[in-house]
Image: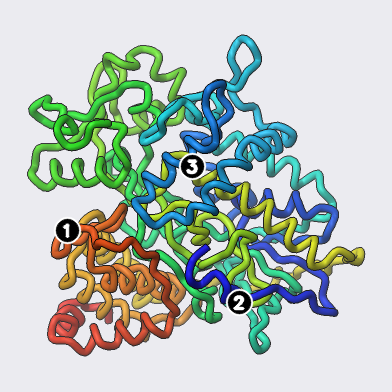
Amino acid sequence: MSQFGSSLAPAVALNGVDDVVILGGGLAGLFCALKLAPRPVTIVTNAPIGGGTSSAWAQGGIAAAVAEGDHHSAHTQDTLTAGDGICEEAIVEGMTREASDRIHDLLGYGVPFDKDLAGKLALSREAAHSSHRVVRVRGDMAGEAIMQALVDAAYKTPSIRIIEGYIGCQLIAEGRYVTGITARRRGGTQRITIPAKAVVLASGGVGHLYSTTTNPGEANGHGLAMAARAGALVSDAEFVQFHPTALNVEQDPAPLASEAIRGDGAILINDDGRRFMDGIHPDLELAPRDIVARAIHTELAAGRGAFLDCREAIGASFPEHFTRVYAACEKAGIDPINGLIPVAPAAHYHMGGVLTDASGRTSVDNLWAAGEVAATGAHGANRLASNSLLEAVVFAGRIAEDIQALMPHHRVHHWAEIDDVDDQASTRNPQERAVVSMVRSAMSRHVGVVRDAEGLTRTLARLQNAETLCRRDSILNMVIAAKLITGSALLREESRGGHFRSDFPQKAEAAKRSFVKLAQIEKLASEAAASDVGQQAVEEEDML
């Protein structure tokens, strides 16, 4: 795959503990656990299982070339085009080829995908797809329906132990092997250690490092930071996708206006009623997300506003076709049938993450990664709409196959109960609260839709200073994840996909993925903190 492909560590089956630990209870984590059955698996999740995950909030659906006349090669080409030169073609081709099989897996788990009168899967079209190939549930309810089906299946599977309400803190390592994780009870001080022969990171993305995001609060980069602290290679961390059309209604997280709304014909206009995507891209509102997000950002920065106009294309059918979005609009006092929906870009998806190979193995022994925390090379610089859920199930399934092949024999495992009755409540101190506020504000302002060297340097310096104020791993991991994204953005002196540098607005001639280790980013952050710009930024930031 990449130049680092051969350095990804081979997993080694060790004697002793036979538990597989999965950090994260979203689509990737649940699908992997179900595929591993009847092998004993422990899922550790911050929120109640299925909750607090971006998977459950996904509105569009899953992209799969299952329609007559469509082919996985066309899906591959659309993905490569959106990825802007740095997708791993073999990875993309394998993912799109497996899409149909994974859809049938989900049907087998009871996911009620929409079907037409002939009983065939109903398909919609989303931005940058050349065909109608997005499989969905009741219009915009795909994520919730998929997660409910998998949660139900997991509860019926006796080999799956679910530990809810625990936040991953650190990976335990012995030499070059990961041997388990430590986790802390959410809202408490009790830490538990879970030894494991195999650890799977399925901890989600980084959206809540930004002040405006469509992601749940649990998407704060902790899995990415844990892997980096354990020495794992991180790839393409600078590439954050900002969904163009979050509802601009001052809610945290920001409600999402699904891509499928534009796929059904809704247009983007400004205060003057001008369709501003006209002249920016031939695909208009269905241009790649980074292009649409920057166009909306430009309108907002100029004070002209940005709105989704669904009146003609969707009209009275809006409540039926987009149930979740309609409810969010109603709550915000917006009438999408007869009026306009105010929108703004919001941090939505992280294309980068922990580097993995085609089997989901990271560069650290006994550590796999799947879903948004992983950088498989499938998304490149800009994710194609509705490819995220597809990537999650494809690589979660591959990880399960890989672990089963490496450890074909397992013992019956009897788990001890976790006693947290006497645990004491934990509260963030004022400094840590200030750190979180600073991280989200600085990331949105300087590491958002538009970036430049000065803003990135200022942010790195502030993050370096903030790290000294972190008492708990949960806050430290947020800071480290933010540093990985910011440092990688500073190193990439070009504009490509979801990464736009106003001081380097052109693409470099050679399209290359990025690969960093935490030590490299720490050195860069130290240099930023020592610079005149960095020192001024730290002096301006009062977190004491």
Answer few, some or many: residues within 10 Å of disc 3's Cα (few below 14, many 20 plus, some between 14 and 19): many
Residues at marks 1 and 2, CA–CA distance in whole angstroms: 35 Å
Tell me the tag on residue 505: 1
Q: Nearer the viewer, mark 3 or mark 1?
A: 3
Q: Earlier in the sequence, mark 3 or mark 2?
A: 3
Asked if 226 appears above or below 413 in the picture, the reply is: below
Label 3 to label 1, Cα distance in Å? Answer: 27 Å
Query: As displayed, is residue 377 above or below residue 483?
Result: above
Which residue corresponds to the image point at 29% horizontal and 36% vertical from the top-left? 287
Neighbours of disc 2 within 10 Å: few (<14), some (14-19), many (20+): many
Q: Which residue is mark 2?
A: 364
- Of the residues tagged 3 and 2, which is closer to the observer? 3
Tell which circle, 3 or 1, labels the residue nearer the N-terminal end: 3
Horizontally, is 407 left or right of 295 in the view?
Answer: right
- In the picture of the structure, the residue carrying the numbered disc 3 is 76
Q: Is residue 294 above or below residue 357?
A: above
